[in-house]
Image (tube, grey):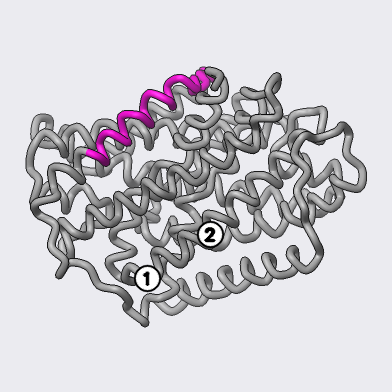
């Protein structure tokens, strides 16, 4: 097992493990455990397939692009506009979620010593990540490996330390009125397509290992998420907070929470940086904007959304997961048919994609999109 293979797995895991992990217990507390297992099994398999499809597109093309650039190259300029809109809403939704949760975590860490409200701490997170993006400081894959390792330790510590507090009465199996609630958040929580180009780059000389790296990089976070959700719900039950750790601190008020906050915050920051830089690359690679303008558009629009009051974490991750994740999935699926017809170079990953499968997945994504829009309009 080579160093670059481990770094590739850690890069994908580090991108996936972020806000979605910490939003999940609150959502599952509302819907019950049965939807958790059903949605997780189905959506992690679908996201794995989408990751493989994106890898095939990347490996079949000689020039670096993000999704809008690939769509322009293989389909047309009109379709590129839709792909751009979907990709940017997804990037902005993810960045907004990182600003919200990053501010909550930093507030919990520093407020007892420095005071100040959550807005100030969210702004600090935004400024720090924007500076990293401005100076083009890439998240070193080794950093993701270390932080992901510590976050796994934090999940283990929470489970071990809180085991004596777990009560079976805190678990419930199903809440029918919220049965569709986890779809968007879980879709969001297990998605990591922005990291696929980096995974392919890390394994440029070991291309035969890319599929395996994507498998472990996608499924390992899903397993960790299930363990995390079961531990948190068993400990906090009805006191489960939107960001998880605030509610947990009422019961486990010790060093475990501080440790978890620190590494949870760092994991969120690294995912935020990757997302911001991916958005910047769309403007640079696919629209040829200059670096400063690309940086401004990538970083400041999510913060503007935060300023005007888009601070409901669950709505943000639900919308981003089901609407933009679903639309990006549809675009990617039909893009792959075009890539397979005229690839620029041979890809080591060749996915079996049939028209019936493409129609089925597209229908699934559309139903998720319709539900989420209906849900937003009726609340």
Crowd band around label 1 with a 10 angstrom C-alpha radius: few (<14), some (14–19), many (20+): some
Which region shows up in magenta? 135-156
**Which comes sooner in the sequence, label 1 or label 2?**
1
Q: Is residue 146 left or right of residue 53?
A: left
- Residue 34, label in figure: 1
Percent x, y for residue 370? 58, 74
Residue at which label 2 appears: 43
Q: Residue at x 29, y 60 (%)?
A: 26
Q: CA distance from mark 1 to mark 2?
A: 14 Å
Percent x, y for residue 126? 39, 34
- The residue nearer to you, when weighing 54 against 80, is 54
Percent x, y for residue 169? 15, 70
- Residue 377, label in figure: none
Q: Is residue 188 visible?
A: yes
- Kind of element beneath mark 1: helix
Q: Is residue 299 left or right of residue 27?
A: right
Q: Do the residues bearing badges 1 and 2 touch, measured as CB atoms within 8 Å?
A: no
């Amino acid at each position: 097992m080579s160093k670059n293979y481990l770094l590739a797995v850690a890069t994908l895991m580090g991108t996936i493990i972020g806000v979605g992990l910490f939003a999940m217990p609150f959502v599952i507390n509302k819907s019950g455990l049965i939807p958790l297992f059903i949605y997780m099994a189905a959506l992690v398999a679908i996201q794995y397939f989408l990751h493989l499809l994106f890898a095939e597109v990347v490996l079949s093309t000689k020039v670096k692009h993000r999704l809008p650039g690939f769509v322009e190259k293989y389909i047309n300029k009109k379709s590129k506009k839709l792909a751009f809109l979907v990709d940017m809403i997804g990037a902005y939704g993810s960045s907004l979620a990182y600003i919200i949760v990053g501010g909550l975590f930093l507030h919990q860490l520093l407020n007892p010593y420095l005071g100040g409200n959550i807005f100030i701490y969210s702004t600090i997170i935004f400024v720090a990540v924007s500076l990293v993006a401005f100076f083009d400081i890439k998240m070193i894959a080794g950093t993701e490996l270390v932080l992901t390792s510590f976050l796994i330790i934090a999940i283990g510590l929470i489970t071990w330390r809180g085991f004596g507090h777990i009560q079976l009465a805190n678990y419930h199996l199903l809440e029918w009125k919220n049965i569709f609630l986890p779809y968007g958040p879980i879709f969001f929580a297990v998605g990591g397509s922005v990291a696929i180009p980096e995974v392919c780059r890390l394994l440029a000389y070991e291309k035969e290992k890319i599929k395996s790296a994507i498998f472990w990089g996608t499924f390992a976070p899903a397993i960790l998420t299930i363990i995390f959700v079961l531990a948190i719900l068993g400990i906090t039950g009805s006191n489960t907070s939107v960001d998880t750790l605030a509610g947990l601190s009422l019961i486990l008020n010790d060093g475990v929470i501080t440790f978890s906050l620190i590494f949870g915050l760092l994991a969120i920051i690294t995912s935020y940086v990757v997302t911001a830089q991916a958005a910047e690359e769309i403007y640079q690679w696919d629209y040829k904007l200059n670096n400063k303008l690309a940086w401004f558009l990538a970083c400041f629009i999510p913060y503007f959304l935060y300023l005007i009051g888009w601070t409901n974490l669950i709505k943000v991750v639900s919308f981003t997961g089901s609407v933009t994740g679903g639309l990006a999935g549809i675009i990617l699926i039909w893009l792959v048919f075009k890539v397979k017809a005229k690839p620029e170079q041979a890809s080591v990953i060749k996915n079996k994609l049939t028209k019936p499968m493409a129609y089925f997945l597209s229908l699934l994504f559309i139903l998720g999109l319709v539900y989420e829009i209906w849900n937003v309009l009726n609340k």
